[in-house]
Structures are given as C-alpha cells and as structure tokens.
Image (cartoon, grey):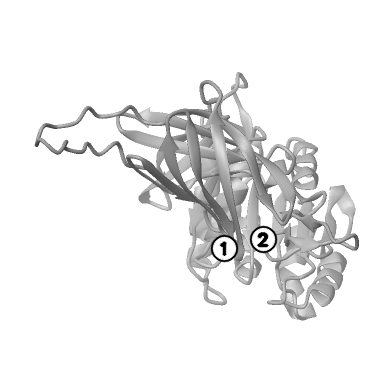
Amino acid sequence: MVLGVVSSCSSGGERATTLPLPTGHYEGPISYQGTDLRVALDLREVAPGQLEADLHFPELEGMSFAAANLRYKEPQLMFEQPGQASRAAVTAIREGDFLRGVFTLDSIKAEFVWVRRGQAAPRSYQPQAWAFQAAGKAQRLTLLVPADTVSRHPAVALLADETSAAAAQARADLLARQGFVTVVVPTAKVPEGDSTSIRSVAAVFQALRHQASVDSTRVGLWLRGPGARELVLATGLTQPAASFVVLENVAVASGEEAKPFQQVSRLRIPVLALYAAADTSLDVRGSTRRLRAAVGSRRGSTVRTFPQANADFVVPGRVNSEGKWLWPQPAPGFAEGLTSWLQQRGPVQ
C-alpha cells in the first residue's frame, strides 16, 4: 500500500502543480453479461503520499477485501486482491471526481465508472507492530486490532506456511472486521516428529495471550492444508489449552493421519473444520468422514462442507438455468458460519 503522487513538468519546463491524492468514498456498478454488481471503494491517505484501499461489494460482503500492491501515479490507480487463486484487480484513471477503468477477475473483464461521494469510511481495524520474545528469540509480527471501544478481544493466531499464507491473510482481514484480534504466524513445513517447530508455535501462541488488547481466555488457532496435522499438536503444549481450532481443507487420508485431531478432541478443544467441495487437491469426502469421527461433536465441534465452492470458498461465476449471469460469490454461509461459531466460543475451561 504505497506510492504518492509523482509530479509532472509542463511543456515550458516549469514544474506542474501536484494534485492531491484521490482519497474518498467512490460508488458505482460493474457489469458483465448484462448483470450489474454494486461496488464501493474507500481510498485513504494513511501517511504523507501513501494510500490504502478497501473494495466492498454491498450485495456480496464476504467478497470485500483490503487492497494489495496498490500503486498510484497520476492519474492511474492500480491494485489487486491479495492471495486468492482467483484474484480480482482494478486499473483506473482519475477524471476529476470519477474513477474510470477496468475490473478483472480471471476471464471476467468489466469496465466501470465510479463517482466520488464524500469522505472514505475508516477501516474497522488497525495494524499494530508486535515485538515479543518467544522460545528465547526476539520476533516481530503484525497484529490486526479492531478499532472499537472494547478493551479486550478474542484472538486468532493463523498459522500459515507458503501454501496457506494467502488464505490466512484473507481470513485475518475478515475476522478483524468482525471484532477479533488476528495475527498471521509464518511457519515452515514441519518434519514428522520435529517438536522444536511445534514448541516455537506454542510459544508464539502463549505470547499472544499476554497482549493488552487480547482476552486471554478466548484465543485459538487457524490452520489450513497438509501442515495442519503436525502444527495442531501445539495445542497440547499450551497452558491453558487453546479455546478453539479452525481447520480449512485439511487432508485426512487415513486413520493414522486422524490421530493428531483425536488428541485435540481429548483436550476438549472445540474444532470447526471447513471443506470446499470443489477443492480437487484432496479427497474431501474421505477427509470429512475421518475428521468427523476424530473430533466428534462434543463442545460444539463440527465439520462442514460447502457445495460448488472452490479452494477459496468461492462459488465461481456462472450462467443459471434462465441464462442470467451470476457473479462469483462467497460460499453461502461460509463467512457468517465461521464468525458465528467463533463468537459462540466462551472462555477456556
């Protein structure tokens, strides 16, 4: 999220007046195959010459995102959606109080004109640098802290290796907007039987509990993909235990691979496991069956599958039976179900 205005020179060699950054709240539609979708863009100057942006879809709020790779050089604005396999991007030209440009998403390309309608709304959370000691080492991460009047919030540590980092960033943004302190914790692939890496994760988790903005009795883990089987063992090294565990698209190919999750169940930690039915990188049906048997339904544990959803938990755009184009949309109930389940998790017992 960078880049200020670059001044230009007039034909006579005199330096032209630098225009202010195009901050504000913009609204307008994007249209594809005859179907409109309303869009709202908030552009803010967060430091001299530096912009940040949030793109909202009022009719599909689960698709909203904080912009990545934002670049502005008068009069062109560019940014994209962070991390999704199907990544949205915006390229626009400022024309007075208007932004005119192209919205792309995979093969979808839609022209738009958005008009400025006042000041940008503030973001509902703020990033905060977090320096701490864990496992005898100094570490630095970034907390996303809700900008509300609550003094202590439930918190989620999102453990992310290279393959899950993008999804972790998207969930951190989603949950921070819903009142959770979130932090993405980079992890490497953990070799089988390597307790050092697992203990390091547990130490970061314990440090998070001591943050002033965190309710230490409501702190849990988020994990995704193949590395979850090893990293979930960190729950057994924390005192008290984690308040909850969220799993996404975790392959459980055998009874042996289910054992780490059985340990979580024995610790009486509630588990929410989410699977995208169209994720072809794993056996969704077999994994859900084995994981459901491992974690059961005690203390609110549940395993859910989302039909037609790809690995990003998005139902791709398509033409319905009436020949009408339907825009890509969040898997129905995904975002609402995730936040509702987390909000119901009380203090650790």
Q: What residue would you read off at disc 1?
A: 164
Q: Position of residue 259 (x, y in %)?
A: 75, 72
Vertical comparison of 122 with 176: above or below: above
Viewer can see residue 158: no
SS assignment at label 2 = loop
The CA distance from mark 2 to mark 1 is 11 Å
The N terminus lies in which quarter of the figure?
Answer: top left
Q: What residue would you read off at disc 2?
A: 312
Say which quarter of the image contains residue 218: top right
> Relative to residue 125, is residue 307 drawn left or right?
right
Q: Position of residue 41 (x, y in %)?
A: 55, 36
Mark 1 residue type: Ser
> Relative to residue 257, is residue 196 drawn left or right?
left
Q: Please tell me which of labels 2 and 1 falls first in the chain.
A: 1
Pick the front one: 333 or 346: 333
Mark 2 residue type: Asp
Say which quarter of the image contains residue 173: top right
Give the label, 2 or 1, closer to the camera: 2
Whether the residues at callouts 2 and 1 have beta carbons within 8 Å, the answer is no
- Residue drawn 75% across and 50% down? 35
Q: Position of residue 83 (x, y in %)?
A: 54, 58
- Residue drawn 70% across and 37% down? 58
Q: Which mark is residue 129?
A: none
